[in-house]
Amino acid sequence: MNDHTIAAATRVLACNWRSSYTVPAAGLYPHQWSWDSAFIAIGLRHISPRRAQQELDAIFSAQWADGRLPQIVFNPRLDVQYSPGAAFWRSEQIPGAPAVPTTGLIQPPNHAIAALLVHQADPEESERRGFLPRAYRRLRAWHGYLENRRTGVSGLVHVVHPWESGMDNSPYWDAALAAISETFEQAIPRPDLDHADASHRPSNAEYGKYLYLAARYRDHACDDRDETFPFLLEDPAVNTMYARSELALGHIAELIGLDPGPHVDRAHAVTASLESLWSPDLGCYVARDVVADTKQEFRTVSGLVPLLIPDLPRTEELLTTLRSPHFALGDVALIPSHDLTAVTFNDARYWRGPSWFNTAWLIAQALHEHGYTDDASRLSSQMVNLGIEHDFPEYVDPRTGEPRGTQRFSWTAALSLDLYKRLHPRDGVAL
């Protein structure tokens, strides 16, 4: 990757910028997505720390009164280009929703990680704009929502919809969805299929269940008090990002003169609770269906993401699984989203096999922090090379590296740019 390709990544981010935030990709994803924006800000900080701050400020400005950061902030003028859109959610009718139209669902809490990195990119600009204290208030409320409204007796955060995990059609959700007899009874618009191959996307049957769950959650005012809600799952990646973000929030608190202790304590508590999701037979963490009280025994990239926790007791076991034929670190493109040897593996369909750039970034970061710098560098180089070779695809076939999904994808460009910048000592930042 040279200066020309740095410019290519920058162009993707510039083209997808919409005055105060970045869309994931023109056409297929015309709104602002929550965890996308956090990942995008991590790359934007190398181009314009101020724009990276604006990216996060935009999602913070759509925060609900209860503290949640919504999965999507809609551009109402483009509502027909994505389903379900603002007209489906009718957030303006829900008490506590912001003035802008949003979903009621959430996404993984990676925002504090991004906010700390963005501040560190230009502390003077951050201080001049009052970014860090402003971000801290929003992030504390966001984490408070997760602790008070989404944490069960296990001590782990649960998701109420596959979309909240960010890994929409992971095998983790199969049993819980199959147990739901209801489906969405109205026509299911699929504008996504105008931009992507149907064989790469979730099926209409899956979308019927997705929309049923979304409509039920909406019709209960998104209040998390529907005691018979049929979908509650604890996901390892969601809880890992929560724990890691609490550590970041503790660092932010210290930087603005506040006590980091409560955040550090919370991170340690979530890490301890995460052990309830460990599967000794699979050598990785798995999801748990809270309703059925059953573990979902699948190897997925979500179950490897806990490597990102600094004091994780299972690091060596996860590395063994990562290097095994199930994920084949170094022998395939990036990190497959699902076990290469499983009967449920599909090299084309969304989160059932293809390799994604955001999860590769998380694993590369974790490998480096644990001292596996050669593995981290190889994975980072793969990510950068595949990104530029295929015009920053949404995801790739793990066996061939063939691009899948849409192209000129914002977090692919942003995270490839981030790794490239940090792999070159002349930039003054180490990976």
Image (cartoon, rainbow, N blue to C red):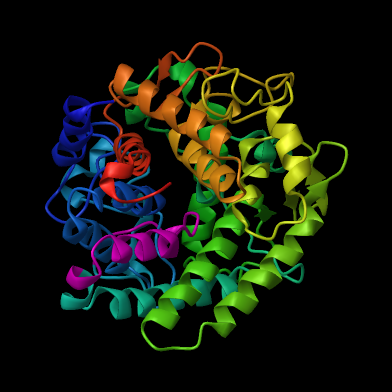
Placement of 385 over or under 243, stated as above or below: above
| Lateral position of residue 305 relative to residue 412, left or right | right
Which residue is found at the position 63% from the left and 59% from the top?
Answer: 310
Q: Is residue 269 above or below residue 299?
A: below
Q: Can residue 285 be seen from the camera position used here?
A: no
Residue 167 image offset from top left, x and y in percent: 54, 40
Picture coordinates of residue 405 (x, y %)? 39, 23
Q: Quadrant of residue 328?
A: top right
Quick check: can you spot residue 44? yes
At a point 30% along the width and 66% down the height, the residue shown is: 119
Pick the residue in front: 101 or 57: 57
Query: Residue 159's spot in the image, x, y percent?
Result: 60, 56
Which quadrant would the N terminus be assigned to in this image? top left
Q: Is residue 393 left or right of residue 225?
A: left
Left or right: 171, with 259 as reference point: right
The residue lying furthest to the front in this view is: 426
Q: Residue furthest left?
A: 19
- Look at the image and say whether residue 53 sits in the magenta stretch: no
Vertically, is 77 above or below 51?
above
In this view, the residue farthest toward the right is: 281
Q: Which residues are magenta?
A: 100-125
Between 101 and 280, the one lying in front of the other is 280
Counting from the top left corner in percent of width and height, residue 211 is at 49, 43
